[in-house]
Amino acid sequence: MDSIAHRHLVCPSCLAINRMPASRPADGANCGACHKPLFGGQPQSVTAAALDKHLGKGDLPVLLDLWAPWCGPCRQMGPQFARATTLLEPAVRLLKLNVDTEPEWSARLQVQSIPTLVLFRDGKPVARQSGLMSAEQIAGWTRSHLS
Ligand SMILES: [Zn+2]
């Protein structure tokens, strides 16, 4: 039996699963496979398959920004979501999904309008919020659903 608590962090760059002692700070850690930072301070764009991996194999809560390039409020929220990443990492994994190129997940989540944020815990959606938000609002909203 393994007596040390571990958590599984999915690398945003290569999707390798990194098994780390829970006591080790994740901030500043690099991926064991591709050696890139596990937390880069920037949201990562994902495909539906990559999102499946983050949700299915990773232990971190996932905050997903569903957006599209033609959506004005989405483009306005882009820099806010990027700044929220620096506020929420390494407690939360922030990901972006383009609903035009990856329509399956927006259909599965029944997303009616964008931008929409969906927060996942243990791979399941636990909260969602539509409309433009500031970085502070994004971070506050996320923390309120994780505490
Ligand atoms: Zn990697």
Image (cartoon, grey):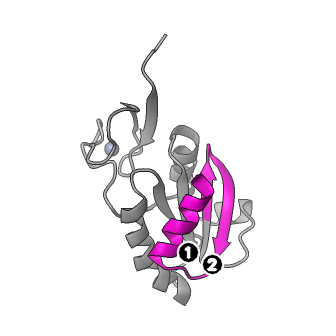
Label 2 sits on what residue type? Ile
Assess disc 1: are there few (<14), some (14-19) or many (≥20) residues with their C-alpha within 10 Å of its C-alpha: many
Task: Give the image location of residue 33, x and y in percent.
Answer: 30, 37
Q: Quadrant of residue 67?
A: bottom right
User: Would residue 101 be visible to someone looking at this image?
Assistant: no
The residue tagged with tag 1: helix, strand or loop?
Answer: strand
Mark 2 or mark 1, earlier in chain: 1
Residue drawn at x 62%, y 46% is 123
Question: 12 or 79, which is in the foreground?
Answer: 79
- The residue that label 2 is drawn on is 114
Task: Give the image location of residue 80, x and y in percent.
Answer: 43, 77
Gap between marks 2 and 1 measured at Cα: 6 Å
Q: How many marks?
A: 2
Disc 1 residue lies near ligand 1 with CB under 8 A: no
Task: Give the image location of residue 113, x and y in percent.
Answer: 69, 79
Question: 52 or 20, which is in the foreground?
Answer: 20
Label 1 sits on what residue type? Trp
Image position of 63 with respect to 115: above or below: above
The magenta segment is: 118-147
